[in-house]
């Protein structure tokens, strides 16, 4: 039996999607960037939450940026735009977004409130839809659009997340989309195994693509992460079978399987210095897409774009 419940905890107004038969639970926080806050499965008498998130609203308000934008919606652009400047349709724009290390980062909605606009419980799933109506408030991005995020919990510990962007303005707009979840199995990521379907990495200078694509095969088959440092964009190979990415804990047998559709052709992977979790980010475009045009979508007035990924937790 599936259910949807709402509770306030540690200052967060949370929405819980739960499969009571198995105990699998997903917690989202609409008011904080449509945040994915928890994904919990039962392991015998214990439970495991694979999402590294914030302890409460106070930490989120004070440290969302410093602690890595954990679990948040990246829109209308993911990653970095150097100096917060770009050109679109022959015009120069300057984002008012505060700069980090000289770049605008991770869009304009990651701290914005979404509201719950739909919820549905069926025999085999629970579903919620969250909406933010962006009105073009930043002079550097004066394009209005609706961002709808749908969380869909299904059987077999499977969570599907779909984002729909609808241009509500009168002119075309540039758009790219992404997510920024951090995953953990409770220990250091050094002890985990990683595999993803890519043999290509974008060359970066100062975390910005140069336009070159380089070979990369370290994790084409399962390999221990160890001391590997990662902050890179990989080009997914959709000719391979899903899942596109697997993160496995060999000590417990639990693994996370990530199944984006081809609306998310890039996989950004980042391991923070503390190495307690790993960000595995589905992106429609890599850093600085507003300038380099890689993966950038020009969305006509009234048109929509859809982006979808799926997370499944398995015991193998």
Image (cartoon, rainbow, N blue to C red):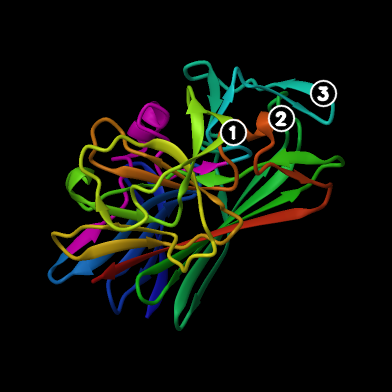
- As helix, strand or loop, the secondary structure at mark 1 comes to loop
Q: Residue at x 57, y 51 (%)?
A: 115
Let me know if residue 18 is in the magenta part: no
- Local packing at callout 3 (Cα closer than 10 Å; few below 14, some 14-19, many 20+) is few
Please provide the residue range marked out in magenta. Answer: 47-74
Question: At 64% from the left edge and 20% from the top edge, which residue is drawn?
Answer: 96
| Quadrant of residue 252 within the rendered picture | bottom left
Front residue of 203/37: it is 203
> Who comes first in sequence, dot 2 or dot 1?
1
User: How far, Cα to Cα, is label 2 from label 1?
Assistant: 9 Å
Front of the two marks 3 and 1: 3
Position above or below: 105 against 55: above
- Most foreground residue, 122 or 305: 305
Quadrant in the picture for the N terminus: bottom left
Distance, label 3 to label 1, CA atoms, is 20 Å
Out of 116 and 179, give the one closest to the viewer: 179
Q: Which mark is residue 213?
A: none
Q: Residue furthest right?
A: 170
Marks 2 and 1 close (CB-CB < 8 Å): yes
Vertical side of 276 occupied by 122: above or below: below
Helix, strand or loop at label 2? It is: loop
Q: Mark 2 against mark 3, which lies toward the viewer? A: 3
Q: Nearer the viewer, residue 316 or 131?
A: 316
The answer to which of marks 2 and 3 sits earlier in the sequence is 3
Q: Point out which mark residue 91 bears.
A: 3
Provide residue 72's location: percent of width, then percent of height.
47, 43
């Amino acid at each position: 039996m599936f259910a949807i419940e709402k509770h306030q905890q540690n200052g967060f107004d949370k929405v819980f999607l739960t499969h009571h038969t198995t105990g699998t639970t997903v917690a989202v926080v609409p008011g904080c960037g449509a945040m994915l806050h928890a994904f919990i499965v039962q392991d015998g008498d214990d439970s495991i939450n694979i999402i590294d998130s914030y302890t409460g609203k106070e930490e989120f308000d004070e440290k969302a940026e410093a602690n890595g934008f954990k679990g948040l919606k990246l829109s209308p652009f993911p990653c970095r735009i150097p100096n917060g400047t770009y050109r679109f349709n022959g015009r120069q724009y300057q984002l008012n977004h505060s700069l980090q290390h000289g770049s605008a980062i991770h869009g304009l909605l990651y701290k914005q409130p979404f509201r719950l606009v739909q919820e549905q419980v069926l025999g085999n799933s629970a579903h919620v839809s969250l909406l933010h109506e962006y009105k073009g408030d930043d002079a550097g991005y004066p394009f209005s659009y609706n961002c709808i995020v749908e969380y869909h919990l299904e059987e077999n510990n499977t969570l599907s997340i779909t984002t729909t962007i609808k241009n509500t303005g009168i002119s075309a707009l540039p758009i790219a989309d992404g997510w920024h979840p951090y995953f953990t199995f409770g220990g250091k990521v050094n002890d985990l195994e990683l595999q993803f379907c890519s043999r290509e990495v974008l060359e970066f200078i100062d975390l910005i693509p140069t336009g070159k694509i380089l070979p990369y095969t370290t994790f084409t088959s399962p390999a221990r992460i160890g001391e590997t440092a990662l902050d890179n964009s990989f080009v997914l190979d959709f000719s391979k079978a899903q899942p596109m990415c697997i993160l496995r804990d060999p000590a417990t047998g639990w693994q996370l399987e990530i199944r984006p559709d081809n609306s998310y052709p890039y996989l950004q992977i980042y391991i923070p210095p503390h190495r307690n979790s790993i960000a595995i980010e589905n992106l429609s475009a890599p850093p600085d897409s507003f300038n380099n045009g890689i993966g950038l979508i020009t969305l006509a007035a009234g048109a929509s774009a859809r982006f979808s990924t799926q997370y499944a937790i398995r015991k193998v």
